[in-house]
Image (tube, helix red, strand yellow):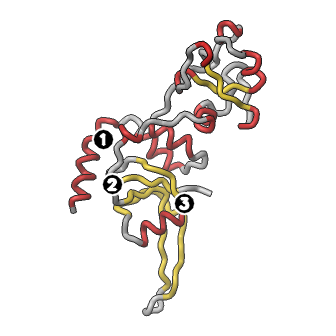
Amino acid sequence: MSLVLALDASGLPRKWINYEDAITYFAKEMVVWSLGDTIATFRGGVQNDGVMSVIETPSIIAVRGKGFNIEKAGKVILSNKTLFARDKHVCAYCGGIFNNGQLSRDHIVPVSRGGQNSWMNCVTACIKCNTSKGARTPQEFGKELIYVPYEPNHYENMILQNRNLLIDQMEYLRSEEHTSELQSLRHLVCRLLLEK
């Protein structure tokens, strides 16, 4: 099932919501604007004039409410789920693709040797490679990383959270990924909307 991408009024992605929550925002008249194709239609009761009530939701909605401060909330939390998604379930040492149960978090510089539990020091490894590597560096293990770790930004994190993205949602998130210069303008628009 596809999810609806919920934005704040200025267009910054906030979270993924289900159809029912999106329809509730429409029913409460909290949707400021929307984009994308209709992905769900809810039919209600019959009104006094005999017409059945219908509420539709597209794939992207902007919801009225407090503005979203990406600097405060934009930090992506490192978890196995987000790490494995970032690395596309590929072991950084052997290159194999594995399911979650066959993967583990590897610290490039082991924690026992002063390594941090951070995006830049963690990669996905299959259990076999991680067990063989132990508390050694990749150089000591005799294998190089086949990809470079990185810290995902807020937009990449939104993509990592929902692997059933619709085309219009992916296009929106990718178009927003490199437009930080528009953030101050968005905050101004959001403040103006909230003042109304």
User: Which residue is at a point 57% across and 47% down the rendered structure image?
Assistant: 162
Name above or below for residue 120 compared with residue 54. Answer: above
- Observer-nearest of 173 and 117: 117
Q: Amino acid at mark 1?
A: Gln
Mark 3 closeness class: few <14, some 14–19, many ≥20 residues within 10 Å: some
- Observer-nearest of 108 and 17: 108
- Observer-nearest of 137 and 99: 137
User: Which residue is at a point 42% across and 57% down the rendered structure image?
Assistant: 35
Residue 66: mark: 2
Disc 3/disc 1 C-alpha distance (Å): 26 Å
Which residue was labeled with disc 3? 18
x and y percent of residue 18 in the render?
54, 60
C-beta proximity under 8 Å, tags 3 and 1: no
Disc 2/disc 3 C-alpha distance (Å): 20 Å
Name above or below for residue 196 compared with residue 98. Answer: below
Q: Nearer the viewer, mark 1 or mark 2?
A: 2
Q: Amino acid at mark 2?
A: Lys
Which quadrant of the rendered structure holds the C terminus?
bottom left
Query: SS of the residue at dot 1?
Result: helix
- Observer-nearest of 156 and 120: 120
User: Which residue is at a point 69% across and 29% down the rendered structure image?
Assistant: 104
Q: Which of the two labelled residues, at mark 3 and mark 1, occupies the earlier sequence position?
A: 3
x and y percent of residue 51 in the render?
47, 87
Which residue was labeled with disc 1? 183
